[in-house]
Image (tube, rainbow, N blue to C red):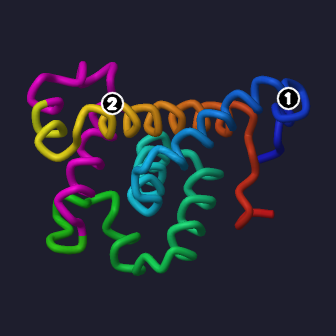
Amino acid sequence: MTQRLDYNQVAPNGAKALGGVYGYVTQSGLPGELVDLVYLRVSQINNCAYCLDMHTRELVKRGVSAEKLALLQAWEEGGSLFSEIERAALAWAESVTLVAQTGVPDVAYQAARKVFNEKQLVDLTIAISLMNSYNRMAISFRNTPQAAR
């Protein structure tokens, strides 16, 4: 597919605003690998090739195993590959990303609050929301994944 337009050039202030949120997430105190796993899972749900490629590469750089990457989409069946905090973050990411279907029920909130304090949960939700925004931008304007160049 051919890229439709470069939104970074068309609306640099909008792109900069999203980058500011990304900067906030990186300094929020959430573990970087956890955030990248969430970014990749959200991108899987949204089927964003550009972001799938980018976040897989980032997790490989971080030393995440091929087994963990392969089973991320089925993390609930991944056994000890995923920690308690990763499982909680991935479950929350799925519920928030699929908000139109899930309504993010109280049971999902209560499960997430067992693992995350208030600030962590807000920061995680900001990260999830940001990746959903980036996915929609990349899909809408057909960003070409590095692997397909």
Q: Is residue 127 left or right of residue 107?
A: right
Q: Is residue 56 left or right of residue 37?
A: right
In the rendered image, residue 119, in percent from the top left (x then y), is placed at: 32, 34
Q: In percent of the image, x 86 and y 33: which residue is there?
A: 5
Secondary structure of the residue carrying tag 2 is helix
Residue reaching furthest to the right: 9
Secondary structure of the residue carrying tag 1 is helix
In the image, what residue type sits under mark 2? Val
In the image, what residue type sits under mark 1? Pro
Few, some or many residues within 10 Å of mark 2 (<14, 14–19, 20+): many
The residue wearing badge 1 is: 12
Q: In percent of the image, x 84 and y 24: which residue is there?
A: 11
Q: In percent of the image, x 54 and y 65: which residue is there?
A: 56
The overriding secondary structure of the stretch rendered in magenta is: helix
Q: CA distance from mark 2 to mark 1?
A: 28 Å
Please tell me which residue lies in front, 111 or 123: 123
Please tell me which residue lies in front, 35 or 55: 35
Q: In percent of the image, x 48 and y 40: which residue is there?
A: 46
Few, some or many residues within 10 Å of mark 1 (<14, 14–19, 20+): few
In the image, residue 99 above or below residue 79? above
Please tell me which residue lies in front, 87 or 137: 87
Mark carried by residue 135: none
In the rendered image, residue 78, in percent from the top left (x then y), is placed at: 20, 68
Q: Which residues are magenta?
A: 82-109
Q: Nearer the viewer, mark 2 or mark 1?
A: 1
In the rendered image, residue 34, in percent from the top left (x then y), is placed at: 38, 58
In the rendered image, residue 32, in percent from the top left (x then y), is placed at: 47, 59
Residue 105 part of the magenta-drawn span: yes
The residue wearing badge 2 is: 96
